[in-house]
Image: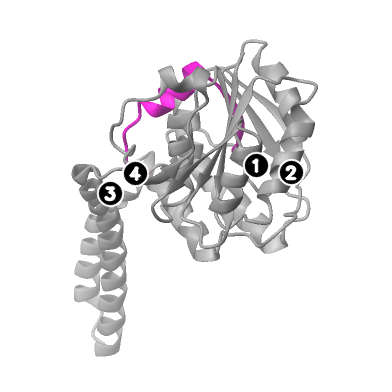
Amino acid sequence: MYLSMVVPCFNEEHGVQRLHDALVAALSGATQDYEVILVDDGSTDRTLDEARRLNEHDPRFRYVSLSRNFGKEAAMLCGLRHARGDRVALLDADLQHPPALLPRMLVLLDTGYDQVVARRSRSGDRAWRTALSRAYYRLARRCLDVRVQDGAGDFRVLSRRAVDALLSLPEQHRFSKGLFAWIGFDTGCVTYRNVPRETGDSRWRPSALVDHGVDGLTSFNDHPLRPALYLGPLVFGLGCAAAAIVGSPQRWAAALLGCAGIEMFLLGVLGEYVGRTCAEVRQRPHYLVKESSPAPVELRAAEPVPGPGLVS
């Protein structure tokens, strides 16, 4: 069966060749029927030049260049839309997702699973990051309508049925970890030790991680809106009690400040959902394509019909 590998790339000019060598070595004994789709997510270095060079020397390595940086979620969606394989793998370009795991994952997928997830340990992570991640996943397990596993990221292999299910989901704010869990299907898992980056620095800054975490918490449940139902009457009751027993102006000011803080928090939560609703109503494409490599001859008949997000 044909295998497609989707690799989002952002400023990976020094890592693309290493990725090529690692993938070729890892798959040499597993399969020769594969393509690699390098999605250049608006890189500002020579990533696109490196992708063009690889495509010239090895046509199995295709590329799609986006018109600007739309983010990893959009880049993964673009790659999935261009993938033509019966099996589709998602992995990062920095080799923190070890290509050597792919043969093992493919064997497991062929036993009847629709998803095989590579779940990493957190060895080598900074203590603060490990603590925050574990706290976030504990919160996610309590709040989300789907189950997201700690350590299970984007590195996975999907069947064509699972890929088609993902592509049928039209939402603008995409939280892939939640979408992978939402579509269901039988899921296998392999574990691996954390691998440090070989080149460059992580693109995930603390603010980006916070935004990503908020996306996850608000994309798959409406629980954050519900405290207003309980806090409204509670704050009203406390205000009535304070009016009856508190005479000090300073205490009144403190009580009003506390109520204002609660109101601002709830308005922020409400604004988050309203903003997401506006994004869904606009229905802008998830990304725009600036340039792409020609598809191999044997795959051109299966090229997708241009639609939302497939603009060149």
Q: Quadrant of residue 236?
A: bottom left
Q: Are marks 1 and 2 in contact (CB under 8 Å)?
A: yes
C-alpha separation, residue under disc 1 versus residue under disc 2: 6 Å
First in sequence: mark 3 vs mark 1: 1
First in sequence: mark 4 vs mark 2: 2
Q: For residue 151, which numbered disc appears in the image? A: 1
Residue 98 at least partly seen: no
Secondary element under disc 4, as helix, strand or loop, is loop
Tell me, what colour scheme is on the image? one colour
| Residue 134 relative to residue 225: left or right | right
How many residues crowd around disc 4 within 10 Å: few (fewer than 14), some, or many (20 or more)?
many
Q: For residue 276, which numbered disc appears in the image? A: 3
How many residues crowd around disc 2 within 10 Å: few (fewer than 14), some, or many (20 or more)?
some
Q: Is residue 154 magenta?
A: yes
First in sequence: mark 1 vs mark 2: 2
Q: Residue at x 52, y 33 (%)?
A: 147
Residue 223 at least partly seen: yes
Secondary element under disc 1, as helix, strand or loop, is loop
First in sequence: mark 3 vs mark 2: 2
Question: Which stretch did the figure color magenta?
Answer: 152-173
User: Could you tell me residue 90's position as x and y percent?
Assistant: 58, 35
The amino acid type found where label 1 is placed reads Gly
